[in-house]
Amino acid sequence: EVQLVESGGGLVKPGGSLRLSCAASGFTFSDAWMTWVRQAPGKGLEWVGRIKSKTDGGTADYAAPVQGRFTISRDDSKNTLYLQMNSLRIEDTAVYYCFVWYFDYWGQGTLVTVSS
Amino acid sequence: DIQMTQSPSSLSASVGDRVTITCRASQGIRNDLGWYQQKPGKAPKRLIYAASSFQSGVPSRFSGSGSGTEFTLTISSLQPEDFATYYCLQHNSNPLTFGGGTKVEIK
């Protein structure tokens, strides 16, 4: 059974940092291009960024609103995807999902709240 | 960046109605588009990929069409479980972009 389990969300002050994790199982994680998507409360879906598999270069791409503040990485030995979020802003408040676009595998999401 | 303009943003319909949702891309994206359904508190689920191909397990009342800049999701006969929010997503180029969503509500 495929599982994507996000963790690491919580309440953080503006300017703070948080690292989200996404633990994957049930598929060959190392072959997968992994994506982060977020959804602000009551709003639509927003693509945050994606990291390719190591065999395809392992590079990451980001949406403009998070470029330079967020970093996506992966540890294939742990089947885990990460999202390091720095310089957080109130507008980063959202549920963050990891997903595998190719197979349409989604996690359950983790809520990040940026508030003073 | 490619902008995806989705319409309408909401609609009210009855069980059995035919429903059509449109996404328009700001530039041509071939058929690099998927349609997603999201219910409250849940992750999205893809219904259609490559603009018109059915995701496995999706009821045949859902269909997609279009290519280039104009795309359509059609629900041929709306069922109670179809009341949800629908999004298009283009994956032709980075950054990937979603449409703004269409909330389908019960009339």
Image: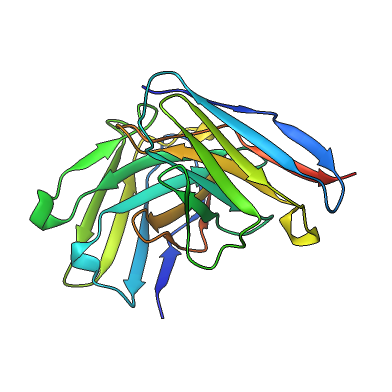
Q: Residue at x 76, y 44 (%)?
A: B18
The image quadrant where one finds the N terminus of chain B is top left
Q: Residue at x 32, y 34 (%)?
A: B92
Q: Residue furthest top?
A: B26
Residue A85, percent from left and from top? 35, 44
In the depicted structure, whether residue B1 falls above or below residue A88? above
Residue B78, percent from left and from top? 77, 52
Q: Is residue B102 left or right of residue B100?
A: right
Q: Is residue B96 left or right of residue B36?
A: left
Q: Could you say which is closer to the camera, residue B97 or residue A60?
A: B97
Q: Residue at x 35, y 69 (%)?
A: A23
The image quadrant where one finds the C terminus of chain B is top right
Q: Residue furthest bottom?
A: A1
**Quadrant position of residue B42:** bottom right
Residue A64, percent from left and from top? 35, 26
Q: Is residue B72 visible?
A: yes
Residue B27, percent from left and from top? 39, 19
**Quadrant position of residue B99:** top right
